[in-house]
Every structure is written in structure tokens, then in C-alpha cells.
Amino acid sequence: MAAEMEPPPLGDAGQTDFREIEDGEGFFVSTVTTLESPEPSSPDPPSMPAEGISTNGPKQEDISLDDDPEDLFAEATEEVSLDSPEREPILSDGPSPAITPVTPTAMLTPRMGLGTAEMFERSLDEIEEDDSGDTFDMHIAVSDPEKVGTFNTVLMYSYIKTSMTIFSKNETTVRRRFSDFLGLHSKLASRYLHIGYIVPPAPEKSIVGMTKVKVGKEDLSSAEFVEKRRSALERYLMRTVKHPILLKDPDVMMFLESSELPRAVSTQALSGAGILRMVNKAADAVNKMTIKMNESDAWFEEKHQQFENLDLQLRKLHASVECLVCHRKELSVNTASFAKSAAMLGNSEDHTALSRALSQLAEVEEKIDQLHQDQAYADFYLFSELLGDYVRLITAVKGVFDHRMKTWSKWQDTQLLLQKKREAESKLQFANKPDKLQQAQDEIKELEGKVQQGEKDFELISKTIRKEVSRFEKERVKDFKVVIIKYLESLVQTQQQLIKYWEAFLPEAKAIA
Amino acid sequence: QAKLGSPRAVNVDLQTDATLQVDISDALSERDKVKFTVHTKSTLPNFKQNEFSVVRQHEEFIWLHDSFVENEEYAGYIIPPAPPRPDFDASREKLQKLGEGEGSMTKEEFTKMKQELEAEYLAIFKKTVAMHEVFLCRVAAHPVLRKDLNFHVFLEYNQDLSVRGKNKREKMEDFFKNVVKSADGVLVAGVKDVDDFFEHEKTFLLEYHNRVKDASAKSDRMIRSHKSKSPLSHNLHVLGKLFAIYMDLNQFFLKVSELFEKTRKIEARVAADEDLKLADLLKYYLRESQAAKDLLYRRGRALVDYENANKALDRARAKNKDVLQAETSQQVCCQKFEKISESAKQELIDFKTRRVAAFRKNLVELAELELKHAKGNLQLLQSCLGVLKGDT
């Protein structure tokens, strides 16, 4: 696994990074900047407010380096086990919702620094059952992707700033690979989905995109890909930590704070575990079709339908925004082409004033082209990605509904089995087989317990889902409003620029004599 | 079918005077042809009445144009370029497809699409009327061409001119004529002109014409992609309805979708204005610069003929054979050449004046319209933002 590197000399505040970068400089070289308060409105569309970081104290070590030669498909060679842990729904030994926060480094006194109110932070005034009373106050930035190692693995930096007491420090910086995020999600999904918690889905894998980056292709599309992924990972983390239950999960804490993570090996798309997941999904789909649930609760019926409709409509919207982005890019290309042509025309025009005006026109069109590009960028990052996230989130929501169905089904099956056993037992009463009778009665007792548990599980998951859905809906409302307002603001800026350009041009046109 | 009632925009700057005013007062689009009502007002004695109208079709315009081109007397003038053939095929096809797909969409969608396509059809219709009108106005404004007999017949004769379109053989002849002409054109253009003015014009026009062609094509493409076809506002609207559980979010989405609907309409108007002020301007000057090139070609041809006639005369004098014949021939060539040269110079100067004026007018109007629409858009966006932010 990772080779041992010497920790940086202590007390060296400015240089805690110890990277090995092949192929010259990495994609975006991380600059250690001092902490600054964020600006109220950031002009650049894609970045969530990128915070300055300052690395704290001696505990902070920034050296999660992978030195082993990176085989693209190394992770595919691990063994496939049918009992792979993520397959087993952990029924009773998973952490129950009301866990007390576990801090990995309990020795350090919690800092009670003041959390800065940021544009993207919404303080959730929710108080869960056993909450320590911490209001949500946390900011995460994922940035500075960097290529490391011979095969250009991209590592992302995750910067966290928080005043919450459950964290050991106010600020943490860790480096993570994409598979780390996937691993985290995988663990959370296996732990919480089946009991009704809506676990935010992780960004999608893209073999093509990632391969391009890994082989060092430095073109525009691979840069876009990295940026797209960076932004998606940031949103993913934020959603995960906003969930009060998930935030306290020890794996989440470990992900956010510890400098080294065990490699998540079962997340490769082409791995044995990956294939197993696909098989399971297919099996689930079949099962879903055969479960006929008697829905006694109208709320669930209604919500289920609503989510189906929402899913459909979000997908359509997503498609039309992508269409819009495409068109804008096309417009940009054609505008640039016209600008060049107009410049040429201006050159050949022999009337001086007209010639100048035509050159000015060409310049205006060139600037407008740049505007189109910037706008397309905004369309994409603000709108399209958000919609994509929500389409995936709704899939998770539907998954949770399905789990409830499965829980119900399991409970019903256990009940049926109990009934059968009771019938068998009553028959045995008249046969003279005391030990068999005893066995049957034992089984019945066990099954009765299981039936009770099944009912409890069903009620619990129903209750959890109701809560989760209500939380999800609130979040969704906020998310969309914020993003749409940002998007409209970007449109306003575009128009203002357009006005500037044409106002500058008009006197030139009038000056033609 | 579409009918036109009101006057339209003329995109070239022309002097009109009271002695002869021509316009297209009406037009009717039938299945495969367009009928233009050509309206004339004149104080000239040549006409029977002071004001009259006739109905003409596109082929008759072409006949008139060709008669100018073939007339040797007009060799020294820039013949106003013929209007392009009315082309509603694409638009018609779209309307037809819409009709076929009527069952598969909601009534709302259908009506909206129908309105858009009809607006497109109307825009094309208006343009073709404008092109035909500009041609007639140019002729009417030209001091010599306005007196042409064919032109008067065109304006006044209220029966069908029975101008049939060219048959296959005539089209073939035209094709070969063009081939010969271009080859000849290259030859003639290669001859250096003694006169600086014409030499400069030759070089200038050649390059200018090519650049205008390129700019015209690129502007068309740019304007086409301006018409975004994303059904964004529609989908936002439906999504808004889905969010009905949260009354405030529903309102939010509805307002946003209304906004997008309005800005989309403005964008469409921007594209239409750019089309009119920029693309049409370039297209027109593409055709006019070609007409100017043709004039230079004719002059060049006359020059070559003149020089050849001179050489023939010298040879005849040297041999003392057919001298009179050669002299007459040389004189004819000389006169022809000088006549063309004289009017050509003025024509080219006028061309430049017209061109500069037209570009000025259109560029100013383009900028003003762009500003108007951008400000309109801005106002819509800002007011909507104000409302939305106030709500949250």
C-alpha cells in the first residue's frame, strides 16, 4: 500500500505538503493561502466559495501519498466473495439512529470558534433526538485537484471549516481520491438506505473521462471533466454532512478528518464487487415487480406517485438545460466565426470610416462570443449539474421507498411462516412426537419474536421515511431557489455586458460619413 | 396563404422623387407562387394614368432584369441585381410536419408551435416582398433605366406578360454562356488597366465580393443558432405545477418559467432583427458587388475589343487592305468603350456612396435594436429577481 514518507518537520506552518508530482506540475497547484472571509457574491459561476485554508497544528499531516505503481485495473483483482460485507443488509447491528457523537480524537478540547456565516450555509435549526445542541455550521470545499503518481491519479483536497463541537478541529484539510468518496458512499448506503434514510448518491464513475485524465491528456475536455467532478464531489460531501444522522457516522468523521484512509477496493466499476452490485440491482428489480403491497397509508401512496412525476419532470428539465448549453456553445462558435469574417470585410472596405466601424463590429461580436461561452458555463454548472444531482437523489428516494416495501414483505413472509408453523404444531399435538413438538414450539416462539421485530422494523422505516422526505423536500426547495436566483443573476450580468458593448459601438456606427 | 397589407422595410438607401414612385403595395402567397401587386405613382407623360397597379410574379421580375443585362445600351451601368426566388419550401415543410404531429402534442403546445411557424412564414414572406421592391426602386431611381420601355410595360401592362420560364435548352445555353463568361472574365481581368481608378476598383471589388460572400454565410449561420429551441420554459412550468405542495415554490417556478418565456420571445426578436439589418444587408451587397463586377467585366471586354480593333486597324493600314472597314470597326469599339467608361466611373462612385449609406443606416439600426432588446431583457430579469428575492 502506501509507502511511508517522513512527516514534514513540525512547526513548519507553510509547507506541510509533501507531494510527488510526476509530469511536472499538477493540474491545479494548491496554494496555501491565509484565511479570509468570503466575498458576499462570487463572480465566477462554478466555484462554491473557495476558502483559504490554514493548516493547523502538529496533528495536521498532509501526506496521504500513494506511491505504488498505479495499475489502472489493480483493484479489479481482489477476490469476489459472495458474502462481501456490503451485500448483507445489516439489520440489527448497524448503528441505530440515536447514536451519541463519536469523536476520533477525544483528547483534544473542542474549539468553540465562531463560524462565519457563508452564502451557502444555511443553519439548520433541527435538533435530532440525542443531538448535543450543535446547530449545523460547517463549510466544506473540495478543490485543487492534483495529479499524482505515474498514472496521474487525481487527488482532491477537501477543506473543512466548522465550529461544531463534534469535530476535533476548526479546520481540516485532507486529500482524497475519487474511490474514497465512492467507498464512503457505499458504506453509508449499506448502513442506512435499508432503514429508510435517504443517502445522497455519489457522483458517477466515468471510465472514459478518467482514463483521459490518467493518461495525461491535457485538453479542454479533460480539464472540464476534472472540474465537473470536483464540483460534484463538493456538492456530494455537503449534502452528506447536512444530514444530521450521516454527519455523526464514524466513517464520515473518519473521511473528513483522518489523513489516511484504507483504500476502498470494491468500488471499481469493472471489479468483481461491481458486477455483483449490478446483479443485485437486477434481482431487486425483479423482486420489486413481484411484491404486491397493501398500502394502508395514503401518504406513502401519494408521495410515491409524486416522486415518480417529479423524477420524470426533472429528467425532462435536465435534458432541456443540456440542450440549451449545447446551443449556446454552437452560437458561440458561430459568433466567433462571424467576427473574424467581419474583420476581414472591414479590412477590404476602402471607405475609411466604414472600415473602422466594421472592425469595431467584429470586436463587439468577439466579445459577445466570450459572453456566450461564459453563459454556457454558468448554465451548465449552476443549473444542469444541480438537476442531474436531483435526478440521482430521487432515485435514492425511490430506493428508500422500495426498501420499505421489502421490509414489509419480509415481515409478511415471516408472518406466513409463523402461521404455517402453528398449523404444523397443532398437527403435531396429535402425533406422539414430544421432541418434534418441542422443536416446533421453539421455532414458533422464535418466529413470533421475528414477526414482532418485523412489524417494528416496518413501522420504524415508515417513520424514518416520513421524516426524511420532509427534510428532503425542505432542502430541495432551498437548493433550487438559491441556484435559480444565482442563475438569473448571471443572466443579468450578461445583459449588462451586452448593453455596454453595443453602447460603445453605436457612436462608431454613427460616425460613418 | 399569406397576404401583406402594410409597407415594409427597405434596406438600401435610395433617392426617390415624385416623377416616378414604385412600391409593392400588396402580395399574396398561393401554393407555389407569390403574386406581387406593383403600385406606381408617376407624373411622367409616358403613362396613361398617374396612379395604377398591376399584379406580377417572380418570373416577370427576372425577365425584366435579364432584358437589362442583354441590352447593349446598358453595358455601362450597374444593373440592379435580380431579387432571389421566393422560397417557402422549408417553412412549408415545417408547417406540414406540425400538422401531421398534431395528435401527439397538447393543444397548448400545438397552438404555440403553430404561431411560431406562422410568424416564421410571415417573416420570409415580408423579406421576399422587400427584395422585389428594392429591385424596382433601384430601377426607378436610375436616371437611364427608369426610362426603359420594358420597365414601363412591366409597370403598366395589366395583363400577364406571358413570360415563360426558360426551358431546358435555354437553361443549358445559359449555363454554357456563364462558363464562357467566367473564363473570359479571368482573361479580361488579367489585362492591366491604364486608368488607376478602374484598376483600383477591379482589385477592390474582387476582394470585397469574396469577403462579403464569406461574411454573409457566417452571419446566416450565427443568426440561425440564435434561435434556441430548448423547451426550457415549458418544462419549468410543468415542474412548477408539480411542486404544488409547497405553495411558495410553485409560485416561484411559475414566475421563473414566465420569465423565460418572455426572454425567449425577446431573443427571437433579436435574431429576427439581426437577420434583417445584418444578414439581409450582406446578402444584398453580395449581389450588388457581383453586378458591379459584371460592369467592370463588360468594360474590360470593351477595352480588349478596342485594343484589338486598334491592332487590326494598324495591320490593315500596313497592308492597305480593308482600311475603311477597320476604321469603322475601330471607331465603334472606341465609342463603345468610352461610353461605358464614362458611365461606369459614375456608377461605381454611386455604388460606393450607396453602400456606405446603407451600411451606416443598418449598423446604427442594428446597434439601436440590440440595445433596446438587451435593456428589455435586463428589465425583465431584474424585476423578476426582485420579486423572487423578496419572496424568500
Image (cartoon, grey):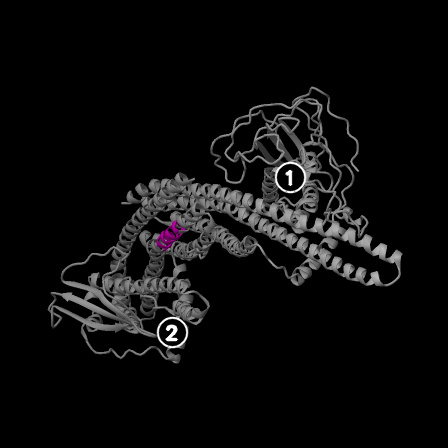
User: Tag 1's secondary structure?
Assistant: helix
Q: Position of residue B215 (x, y in %)?
A: 41, 54
* Chain label for disc 1: A
Instruction: Give the residue at mark 1.
Output: A246
Query: In the rendering, which numbered label is found on residue B336?
Result: none
Q: Which residues are magenta?
A: B258-271
Instruction: Look at label 2 and name its amino acid.
Output: Asp
Q: Is residue B360 left or right of residue B230?
A: left
Badge count: 2
User: Tag 2's secondary structure?
Assistant: helix
Instruction: Give the residue at mark 2.
Output: B174
Residue B38: image quadrant is: bottom left
* Chain label for disc 2: B
Residue B182 vertical position relative to residue A238 in the rendered view, above or below? below
Q: Nearer the viewer, residue A388 or A145?
A: A388
Residue B239 vertical position relative to residue A375 in the rendered view, above or below? below
Residue B155 part of the magenta-drawn span = no
Q: Is residue A215 left or right of residue A301?
A: right
Q: Kindly indicate whether the residues beneath marks 2 and 1 are on one polypeptide chain.
A: no
What separation in Å lies between label 2 and label 1 (alpha carbons)? 81 Å
Q: Position of residue B264 (x, y in %)?
A: 39, 53
Residue B52 in view in this figure? yes
* Magenta residues, dominant SS class: helix
- Residue beneath the point at 74% across and 47% down: A86
Characterize the local packing of mark 2: few (<14), some (14-19) or many (20 or more) Cα atoms within 10 angstroms.
Answer: few
Q: Is residue B329 left or right of residue B219?
A: left
Q: Nearer the viewer, residue B85 or A46?
A: A46
